[in-house]
Image (cartoon, rainbow, N blue to C red):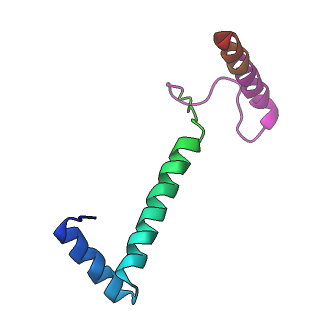
């Protein structure tokens, strides 16, 4: 295995500062890289919906869930139903 010389020096220095072997540092780095890549592949995509404008919709009071929860439920149902129709 060939490594960039500067990278090897940095890794060896890190190992020495942390009283570890060079091999253990490389093994941990590879494990983290593989775990991170695996997590990225398995993570679910989340679509964030952004509304433009200023302020809240008319009639919405953030302190009163009954003024906004039905709207959210309706939007969720529409999104789910639309997604189901798009997949068909």
Q: Position of residue 60 (x, y in %)?
A: 70, 29
Q: Nearer the viewer, residue 73 or 56?
A: 73
Quarter containing the N terminus? bottom left
Residue name at image x 53 percent, y 29 percent: 50
Q: Position of residue 31 (x, y in %)?
A: 48, 63
Image-based side of 87 in relation to 64, left or right: left
Residue name at image x 58 percent, y 35 percent: 46
Tell me which segment is drawn in magenta: 51-78
Q: Position of residue 20 (x, y in %)?
A: 40, 86
Image-based side of 2 in relation to 49, left or right: left
Taking the magenta stretch, the answer to whether it contains residue 76 is: yes
Q: Position of residue 49 (x, y in %)?
A: 56, 29
Q: Residue furthest right?
A: 66
Image-based side of 47 in relation to 24, left or right: right
Quarter containing the C terminus? top right
In this rendering, the count of numbered labels is 0
52 above or below 21? Answer: above
Q: Quadrant of residue 5?
A: bottom left
Q: Residue furthest front?
A: 1
Q: Quadrant of residue 47?
A: top right
Taking the magenta stretch, the answer to whether it contains residue 42 is: no
4 above or below 59? Answer: below
Q: Quadrant of residue 51?
A: top right
Residue name at image x 75 percent, y 20 percent: 77
Residue name at image x 28 percent, y 80 percent: 12
Q: Residue furthest bottom?
A: 19
36 above or below 17? Answer: above
Q: Nearer the viewer, residue 56 or 25?
A: 25
């Amino acid at each position: 295995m060939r490594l960039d010389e500067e990278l090897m020096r940095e890794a060896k220095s890190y190992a020495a500062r942390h009283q570890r072997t060079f091999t253990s540092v490389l093994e941990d780095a590879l494990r983290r890289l593989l775990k991170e890549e695996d997590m990225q592949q398995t993570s679910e995509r989340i679509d964030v919906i952004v509304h433009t404008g200023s302020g809240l919709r008319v009639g919405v009071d953030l302190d009163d869930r009954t003024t906004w929860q039905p709207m959210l439920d309706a939007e969720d149902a529409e999104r789910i139903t639309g997604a189901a129709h798009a997949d068909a």
